[in-house]
């Protein structure tokens, strides 16, 4: 790679900082990335070298973590988020976006944030990274994909009470989600004709209307419309039979109606190796598929597999988009 990946600090009191060092140790110089963080927060975590510009990360020894320094308000205590650091956490995300938009970084990988600390310390008004990055990119809608070897899932509705899902599930939202996913699979994953599988909302995909009519009135007509426009789509499928190995071999990504319908099968199949990907952005963004893990932060217990997978995924997507 001619340009490194920008890795944000996320919540400094969480596991993100220590995982950055462990990812560097595992990847070496095979995948260049740099961490944006307060160098004062890194004491005792490992060897690092402060860099002045992203390109300098390409010259840092493989055993040392390149760090682009960013001032935070207070010292860091693992396991205890300080709301005073919230503005800097947000500023680091904005800085990473600016670096990738100006071509200084190939992609962004984001460490987990603590939404409560961001709300308390900076009035953060977004449900998470996905919505915030869409706002920074100036786009109306982005899509969250979770990916692991053997499965990619996309929830149409994300962080909302289950009782609100049927009202939120509109033809416009479903079509936008499917089309963004199809386009991203072509552009960022190199698939010429992506195969999509769409889950039903209700048990047994509504069972012909006996368990709900969303499949008949909303999901099936939209699938038929998109098939006529050239997309390759299966469904609506019963969610309880679409994630075993034989079923997964039939599609490249599963479109699911709500959060847990998508995330439960993925995390069951590969709890430590899943990655969070934001589709529809004008730049590449991935993230490990876990939270800040405040209870084990700073103790050397956190598993770096998901961060390593997210960095590798970002690199592959950047290469595909360049091609």
Image (tube, helix red, strand yellow):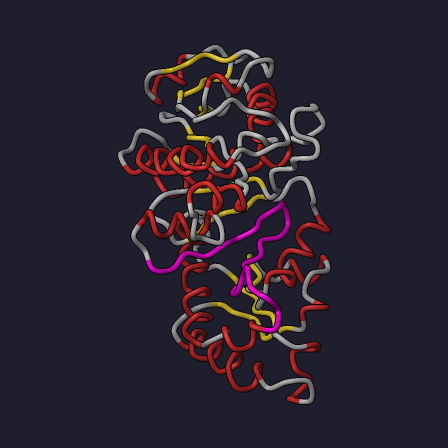
Vertical order, 209 against 145 (above or below): below
- Residue 202, image quadrant: bottom right
Q: Is residue 323 visible?
A: no
> Is residue 150 located in the magenta-colored stretch of the structure?
yes
Q: Does residue 83 appear left or right of residue 52 in this picture?
A: right
> Is residue 11 located in the magenta-colored stretch of the structure?
no
Q: Nearer the viewer, residue 234 or 314?
A: 314
Q: Does residue 146 appear left or right of residue 191 in this picture?
A: right
Residue displayed at 64% across by 31% down: 79
Expressed as whole percent of the image width and height from the top left, the position of residue 34 reads 44, 24
Residue displayed at 46% across by 47% down: 129
Q: Quadrant of the N terminus?
A: top left
Q: Quadrant of the C terminus?
A: top left
Q: Does residue 307 appear left or right of residue 124 in this picture?
A: right
Q: Nearer the viewer, residue 19 or 293?
A: 293
- Residue 43, image quadrant: top right
Vertical order, 15 against 261 (above or below): above
Expressed as whole percent of the image width and height from the top left, the position of residue 55 reads 34, 20
Vertical order, 211 against 143 (above or below): below
Q: Residue furthest left?
A: 102
- For the image, the number of numbered tags is 0
Q: Nearer the viewer, residue 226 or 306?
A: 306
Q: Is residue 292 visible?
A: yes
Expressed as whole percent of the image width and height from the top left, the position of residue 87 reads 41, 36
Expressed as whole percent of the image width and height from the top left, the position of residue 41 reads 52, 20
Vertical order, 156 against 25 (above or below): below
**Which residues make up the magenta segment?**
140-163
């Amino acid at each position: 790679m001619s340009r490194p990946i920008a890795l944000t600090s996320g919540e400094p009191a969480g596991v993100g900082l220590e995982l950055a060092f462990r990812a560097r140790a595992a990847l070496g110089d095979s995948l260049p990335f740099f961490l944006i963080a307060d160098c004062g927060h890194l004491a005792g975590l490992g060897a690092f070298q402060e860099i002045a510009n992203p390109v300098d990360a390409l010259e840092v020894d493989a055993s040392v973590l390149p760090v682009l320094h960013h001032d935070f308000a207070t010292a860091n205590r693992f396991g205890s988020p300080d709301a005073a650091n919230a503005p800097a956490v947000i500023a680091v995300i904005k800085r990473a976006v600016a670096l990738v938009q100006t071509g200084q970084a190939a992609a962004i990988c984001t460490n987990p944030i603590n939404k409560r600390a961001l709300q308390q310390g900076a009035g953060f008004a977004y449900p998470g990274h996905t919505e915030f990055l869409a706002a920074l990119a100036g786009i109306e809608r982005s899509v969250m994909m979770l990916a692991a070897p053997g499965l990619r899932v996309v929830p149409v509705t994300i962080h909302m009470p289950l009782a609100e899902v049927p009202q939120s599930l509109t033809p416009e939202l479903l079509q936008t989600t499917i089309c963004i996913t199809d386009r991203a699979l072509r552009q960022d994953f190199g698939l010429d004709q992506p195969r999509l599988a769409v889950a039903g909302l209700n048990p047994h995909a509504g069972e012909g209307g006996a368990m709900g009519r969303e499949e008949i009135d909303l999901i099936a007509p939209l699938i038929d419309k998109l098939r006529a426009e050239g997309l390759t789509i299966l469904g609506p499928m019963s969610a309880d039979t679409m994630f075993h190995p034989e079923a997964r071999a039939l599609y490249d990504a599963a479109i699911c109606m709500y959060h847990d319908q998508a995330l439960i099968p993925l995390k069951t199949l590969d709890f430590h190796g899943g990655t969070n990907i934001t589709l529809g952005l004008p730049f590449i963004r991935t993230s490990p598929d876990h939270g800040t893990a405040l209870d084990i932060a700073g103790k050397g217990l956190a598993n770096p597999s998901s961060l390593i997978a997210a960095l590798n995924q970002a690199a592959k997507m950047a290469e595909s988009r360049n091609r």
